Image (cartoon, rainbow, N blue to C red):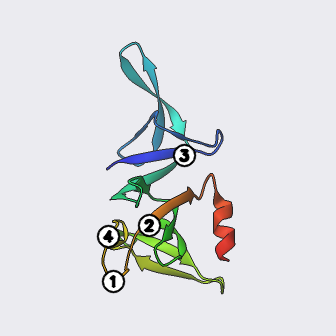
Amino acid sequence: MKTRAFDPIEKRWRTDYVVMPDGDIHRTVERMDFCIIAEHAYWKLSRFTEHLDIENNEIYENHIVKLASGSIGVVKFYNGSFVVDIRKRSGTFEFYEWPSEYFAKYDFDDGFVPGALIIGDVFTTPELLEEVK
């Protein structure tokens, strides 16, 4: 499974890590022509959904996306599938399963253009969620 890790201390995405069989994340250090597994890291792991947004960017867990409907939500893994968690103005949350057609861009004559656009993520741009409250 393809993943990426966010380092909350340095506030950046990292690629120098390995996920252990128990799920722990460990930083790796390159030495000459091999890697050494270093200390445990408390980074936040995001799984790849295996889908692209309408601009062909990879969509990961914890991305903030804008759907074709105008709704803004967070990509989450819930009950075995990826969903978009859409915060309603009332303050409640609704989970929407995200079928494949919402990840792809379509061009139908009837004007129905489902699609998702990544506009940020919960770690570096959480303020994007404020506008939907």
Query: Looking at numbered disc 3 in the image, what kind of residue is underneath it?
Result: Phe
- Label disc, if present, on residue 6 of the rendered structure: 3
Q: Is residue 93 left or right of residue 130?
A: left
Mark 1, mark 4: which one is toward the viewer? 1
The residue that disc 1 covers is: 110
- Label 1 sits on a secondary structure element that is loop
Q: Are marks 3 and 1 in contact (CB under 8 Å)?
A: no
Query: Looking at numbered disc 2 in the image, what kind of residue is underneath it?
Result: Ala
Query: Looking at numbered disc 4 in the image, what kind of residue is underneath it?
Result: Tyr
- Indicate which disc, 3 or 1, sits on the residue closer to the N terminus: 3
- Label 2 sits on a secondary structure element that is strand
Residue sitting at x 66%, y 41%: 9
- Label disc, if present, on residue 106 of the rendered structure: 4
The residue that disc 2 covers is: 116
- In the picture as drawn, the residue positioned furthest to the top comes out as 32
Q: CA distance from mark 4 to mark 2?
A: 11 Å
Q: Nearer the viewer, residue 101 or 44?
A: 101
Query: Looking at numbered disc 1 in the image, what kind of residue is underneath it?
Result: Asp
Q: CA distance from mark 4 to mark 3?
A: 32 Å
- Label 4 sits on a secondary structure element that is loop
